Image (cartoon, rainbow, N blue to C red):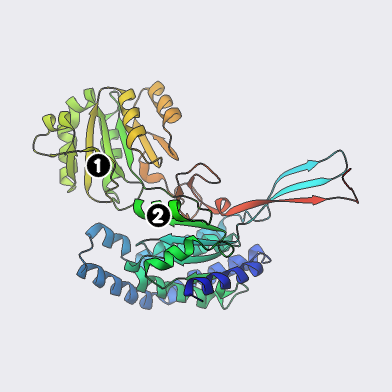
Amino acid sequence: MSEVVNKAAAAKAAAAVLNRLTTAEKNEALLLMAGALISEQDEILAANEEDLIRGREQGTSSSLLDRLKLTPERIADIAEGIKQIIDLPDPVGDVLETIHRPNGLFIEKTRVPLGVIGIIYEARPNVTVDAAALCLKTGNAVVLRGGSSAISSNRRIVAALRNALSRSAMPADSLQLIEDANRSSVEEMLKLNGLLDVLIPRGGASLIRNVVQNATVPVIETGAGVCHTYIDDTADYSMAEAIALNAKVQRPSVCNSMETLLLHSTFANKHLSVLADRFREANVELRGCDLTRELIPGILSASDQDYATEYNDYILNIKVVQDLDEALQHIGLFGTKHSECIVTETEAHADRFLMEVDAAAVYHNASTRFTDGFEFGFGAEIGISTQKLHARGPMGLPSLTTTKYRVKGSGQIRT
């Protein structure tokens, strides 16, 4: 059998044991995992440097190298993320609803693990730890398939985590890493019905599209982030500048960063020149519509393809619109239902935006960079779902469970 089948089968066997563990036993395993990241930090950093060297040799962009890079501080933050998950309530076993039927049946709707979760993702090794911790806390076994760019880091991280699990009540086989970097390993996971209960893709648009369109295993879709900030005519300039800059440059390589800035024409006429200077000072390349280019000559023209692109880089589209309706129309055409923001002092406009924009997270006077499991109080997240079934937005622990009806009777039969 292939590596994918062998490791998925091992995870499925381990899932049966996970289902019996107490919250205390799961938390003890997670604490050991957090400790292993710190105690084996030197080995993890050495493996990460292998990935970085390979990435530089292959011409990987600086923003993607930033996503890949680990430091002692980042490892400490990742370990702290596990500890935050420990402190969160365990949703498994929660009773969501009780029903007393006239015939005496007592029915409880409870949360239970999904089973075995397959996660296909790209360059960020912190996802390896976040995904493992969230899945294991909720009693799910997990099969990880990361990108080839982070294979050395992921291999060493998973080795450390499995070493920790071997000292706990949780089977080490609960956590599996597919090391085969060939595309065929992904295609095999997509069809692994019976061993994988659900797939979660995390990465660029092409990866997510491939999984959604070709998987026979059920998929929770995490979407690309073509996120917008719309600055209305009544926006306070200082607030608008701070929000827009934060949304673009605080960490441009992540999915909740802004890709297109929409400006009401009244605001643009007054402030775009100064705002453009602030972006240039932050080394952001600007592209714009015809009206934008009249106000800040010399920038590139923004095409429909640009408006539909998730750059994950220091590149920003700017479009001047005549009113809120035009802004809503643009977001409806080019948005990916991830995170959208309006900056305005007009409450009626804010209410319309929050009601009408179809996205997992919508903001009034706050940066889209807050669409994140930590910032929402969920601990680490498994991803940000842009679909509408089962889970939407940052997916914390409850999103990794399903429900079971437990029915108790006293001899009832149906007539």
- Mark 1 or 2: in front is 2
Separation (CA) of disc 1 from disc 2: 20 Å
Residue type at mark 1? Gln
Determine the residue positioned at 50% across, 49% down.
377
Q: Quadrant of residue 73?
A: bottom left
Report if residue 149 is visible in the image. yes
Tell which of 213 and 252 is nearer to you: 213
The reply to whether dot 1 and dot 2 touch (C-beta < 8 Å) is: no
Numbered label attached to residue 225: none
Provide the residue designation for mark 2.
210
Numbered label attached to residue 305: 1
Measured as percent of width and height from the top left, residue 47 is found at 34, 75
Q: Is residue 82 above or below residue 296?
A: below
Residue type at mark 2? Asn
Q: Is residue 8 above or below residue 323?
A: below
Determine the residue positioned at 19% across, 46% down.
284
Q: Residues within 10 Å of mark 1 (few under 14, many from 20)?
A: few
Determine the residue positioned at 45% across, 40% down.
360
Determine the residue positioned at 65% across, 68% down.
16
Measured as percent of width and height from the top left, residue 124 is found at 36, 62
Q: Quadrant of residue 40?
A: bottom left
Measured as percent of width and height from the top left, residue 32 is found at 53, 72
Tell which of 51 and 76 is nearer to you: 51
> Reading the chain from its start, which is encountered first: label 1 or label 2?
2
Helix, strand or loop at mark 2? helix
Q: Residues within 10 Å of mark 2 (few under 14, many from 20)?
A: some
- Asked whether, in this view, residue 278 is left or right of residue 248, the answer is left
Q: Quadrant of residue 202?
A: bottom left
Report if residue 79 is visible in the image. no
- Asked whether, in this view, residue 9 is left or right of residue 277, the answer is right
- Asked whether, in this view, residue 121 is left or right of residue 191, the answer is left
Quadrant placement of the C terminus: top right
